């Protein structure tokens, strides 16, 4: 790939993410302001009866809530461009600090689930494709179709009841043991609390990868060059490794990176079910309590996160497929 092609590719992606963030920021800001939640009342909380109209007005003035909507939006955009994402009304801390702390917890959850679902899903899809028409193929397709229509929160509750309540193999929820100081929490403690939400996300993520990999592999096995390879005596996994792996891996990689949005959405539900202190639980809390700066910050961060997945998918496609590196149109 030539330098001008790389520059054009990066410029195109930059324009796309810029347009996306501008539109998403304005729409999110407008929806939040039109919501029935009163940020001042959410900020006051249980002390609502002890706060008079003058104090409410002072709080609104402090957070800039008494200014016109357009002015509030422009002030917020200007502050974000200067690196100031505001202060969370819930945590009383900078928004970027809260997002960074909570995202690390979510990254451990989403990262392990993403890798596990990709590997297992690809393996099951290849196995089902190579065993087309057998009981193995039927079992894998039944498993995938069933889980593809299963809600994340329902599966999470099922895992919680079976493995945490009935069998008592794992803790009921949270990210660390209750009542334990942060410095006393060990890696094994965090891992033990991570397993159930991670399994919930990875088990559901397997379905789409397996089904798409199987379908693509069947198309490859029906192609002319595979028939020619069979005529030369190639079969089984040797045939797959020589002629099918790259053609099957490309759509699987694209699908896996493009699933960042589903992964993030699933993490929001899983974190709520298991009370896992990640970014998903934080965005729900910020929405319910009217924390406008934190909510807008997470919306922008999640958009960049999902866009990064699509960008990595495009880059991976160009690295793996020489035709795209040479300038072929996708």
Image (tube, helix red, strand yellow):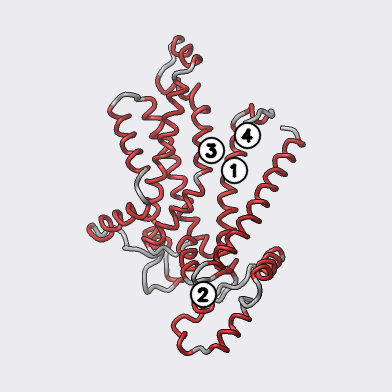
The residue where tag 2 is placed is 38
CA gap between label 4 and label 1 equals: 10 Å
Instruction: Give the residue at x 55% y 75%.
Output: 89
The label nearer to you, 3 versus 2, is: 2
The residue where tag 4 is placed is 318
CA gap between label 1 and label 3 equals: 8 Å
Check contact, mark 4 vs mark 2: CB within 8 A. no
Task: Judge the density around disc 3: few (<14), some (14-19), many (≥20) Cα neighbours within 10 Å.
Answer: many
The residue where tag 1 is placed is 312
**The residue positioned farthest toward the top in the image shown:** 231
Q: Secondary structure at mark 2?
A: loop
Which quadrant of the rendered structure holds the N terminus? top right
Which quadrant of the rendered structure holds the C terminus? top right
Residue 77 — which label?
Answer: none
The residue where tag 3 is placed is 254
Residue 67 visible, this angle: yes
Residue 208 against residue 156 in the figure, above or below: above
Q: Secondary structure at mark 1?
A: helix
CA gap between label 3 and label 4 equals: 11 Å
Task: Judge the density around disc 2: few (<14), some (14-19), many (≥20) Cα neighbours within 10 Å.
Answer: some
Q: Counting residues from the N terminus, which is met first, the one under dot 4 or under dot 2?
A: 2
Check contact, mark 3 vs mark 4: CB within 8 A. no
């Amino acid at each position: 790939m030539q330098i001008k092609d790389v520059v054009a590719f990066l410029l195109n992606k930059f324009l796309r993410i810029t347009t996306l963030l501008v539109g998403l920021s304005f729409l999110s800001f407008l929806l939040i302001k039109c919501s029935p939640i009163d940020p001042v009342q959410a900020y006051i909380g249980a002390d609502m009866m002890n706060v008079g109209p003058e104090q409410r007005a002072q709080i609104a003035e402090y957070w800039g809530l008494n200014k016109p909507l357009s002015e509030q939006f422009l002030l917020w955009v200007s502050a974000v461009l200067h690196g100031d994402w505001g202060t969370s009304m819930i945590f009383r801390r900078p928004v970027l600090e809260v997002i960074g702390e909570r995202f690390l917890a979510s990254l451990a959850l989403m990262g392990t689930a993403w890798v596990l679902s990709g590997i297992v899903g690809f393996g099951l899809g290849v196995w089902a494709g190579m065993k087309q028409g057998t009981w193995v193929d039927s079992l894998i397709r039944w498993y995938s179709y069933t889980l593809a229509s299963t809600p994340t929160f329902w599966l999470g509750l099922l895992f919680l009841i079976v493995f945490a309540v009935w069998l008592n193999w794992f803790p009921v929820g949270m990210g660390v043991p209750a009542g334990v100081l942060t410095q006393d929490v060990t890696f094994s403690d965090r891992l033990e609390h991570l397993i159930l939400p991670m399994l919930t996300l990875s088990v559901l993520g397997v379905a789409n990868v397996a089904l798409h990999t199987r379908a693509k592999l069947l198309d490859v096995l029906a192609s002319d060059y595979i028939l020619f390879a069979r005529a030369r005596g190639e079969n089984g996994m040797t045939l797959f490794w020589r002629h099918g792996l790259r053609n099957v891996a490309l759509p699987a990689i694209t699908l896996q990176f493009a699933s960042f949005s589903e992964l993030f959405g699933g993490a929001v539900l899983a974190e709520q079910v298991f009370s896992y202190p990640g970014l998903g639980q934080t965005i729900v809390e910020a929405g319910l309590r009217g924390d406008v700066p934190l909510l807008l910050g997470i919306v922008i961060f999640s958009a960049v996160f999902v866009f990064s997945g699509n960008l990595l998918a495009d880059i991976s496609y160009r690295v793996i497929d020489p035709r795209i590196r040479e300038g072929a149109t996708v």
